Amino acid sequence: MSAEQNKALVIRHYDESWNQQDEDAVDEIFAEDFVGYSSGSPEPIKGREGVKQSLEGYLSAFPNLQMTIEETVADDDKVAVRWFAEGTHNGDFLGMPPTGKDVEVGGIDIFTVVDGQIKEAHGLYDHAGMMQQLGAGESD
């Protein structure tokens, strides 16, 4: 696939997996042996089921979560995305009960696409800033 086709696949992931919350899209977009590394997860995300579990964790905590792609850069099999997300904390997140607070957070993901599917990803987002917005560490 061309760099532009790889870029379109990654954009599709944000649109369908995140914004439309379409779990079935994961099976088409991600390789079976996918591995993802994220600043928000101490362990790698492995396989399609791992992607689905990760999405479910965020989307159950922030059911109205919307991802906005601010910039993409594609070179051969690599696609980098700078994104912005916003949502309301209405479900349990990492053991924190719902706060009803709105959260805004930005991040960068770098994907490797092989044979028309996402094979690997490395993500970095402002996890500490998000937790601060939720009031983590504040005393009553």
Image (cartoon, helix red, strand yellow):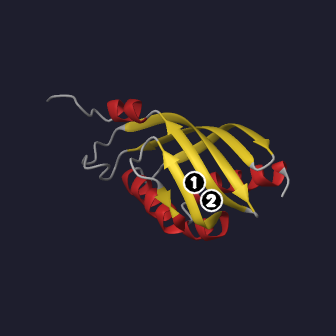
Residue on which the image places disc 2: 16
Q: Is residue 99 above or below residue 15?
A: above
Local SS, label 2: helix
Residue name at image x 49 percent, y 64 percent: 52
The reply, left or right, for residue 10 in relation to residue 64 is right
Q: Position of residue 87 (x, y in %)?
A: 45, 43
Q: Around disc 2, counting alpha carbons within 10 Å, would you say few (fewer than 14), some (14 to 19), or many (20 or more)?
A: some
Q: Position of residue 68 (x, y in %)?
A: 61, 41
Disc 2 residue type (three-letter)? Glu
Q: Which mark is on residue 103?
A: none
**Quadrant where the C terminus lies?**
top left
Q: Are marks 1 and 2 in contact (CB under 8 Å)?
A: yes
Residue on which the image places disc 1: 19
**Quadrant where the N terminus lies?**
bottom right
Q: Around disc 1, counting alpha carbons within 10 Å, would you say few (fewer than 14), some (14 to 19), or many (20 or more)?
A: some
Residue name at image x 54 percent, y 61 percent: 21
- The Cα atoms of the two marked residues, 1 and 2, are separated by 6 Å
The reply, left or right, for residue 5 in relation to residue 57 is right
Disc 1 residue type (three-letter)? Asn
Q: Position of residue 11 (x, y in %)?
A: 70, 51
Residue name at image x 75 percent, y 63 percent: 116
Q: Is residue 84 above or below residue 95?
A: above
Local SS, label 1: helix
Q: Position of residue 108 (x, y in %)?
A: 59, 37
Give whichever of 3, 43 is nearer the camera.
Answer: 43
Q: Is residue 136 above or below residue 19?
A: above
